[in-house]
Amino acid sequence: MHEILFLVEEDPEGGFTAQATGGTDSIFTDADTIDELKLAIMDALRCHFEDESQIPSFIRLHHVKKDET
């Protein structure tokens, strides 16, 4: 796997959540800020993959913001 995509959403209670898509959707994390979320995603990937060399070289974040209108 060369790429992994995370769906990032704002949590209604504050902060952000990120969930991997496409077969690796068991990877889920959250944080208070986007910068903290990026670090949490890396920690989650290290926990998910037994060997760090298996972590995809491209990690994409797709930030979805719900329209409140």
Image (cartoon, helix red, strand yellow):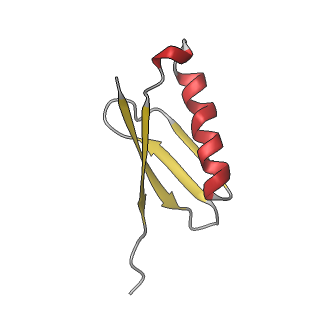
Residue drawn at the location 55% of the way across and 17% of the way down: 52
Work out which residue is located at the far left of the displayed protein and give it: 22
Examine the rendered structure and indicate whether residue 40 appears above or below residue 24. Answer: below
Q: Which residue ends up furthest to the bottom in the rendered image? A: 69
Q: Residue 4's quadrant in the figure?
A: top left
- Name the image quarter holding the C terminus: bottom left
Q: Nearer the viewer, residue 20 or 60?
A: 60
Please identify the quadrant where the N terminus is shown.
Answer: top left
Residue 55 image position (x, y, % from top left)? 48, 23
Q: Is residue 59 left or right of residue 21?
A: right
Q: With 35 as the anchor, is 4 left or right in this view?
A: left
Q: Is residue 36 left or right of residue 62?
A: right
Q: Residue 45, relative to residue 61: is it above or below?
A: above
Count the numbered circles shown. 0
Q: Residue at x 64, y 53 (%)?
A: 35
Residue at the top extreme, as displayed? 51
x and y percentages locating residue 5 in the rendered image = 38, 41
Residue at image point 52% right, 19% down: 49
Residue 22 percent coordinates (x, y):
31, 35
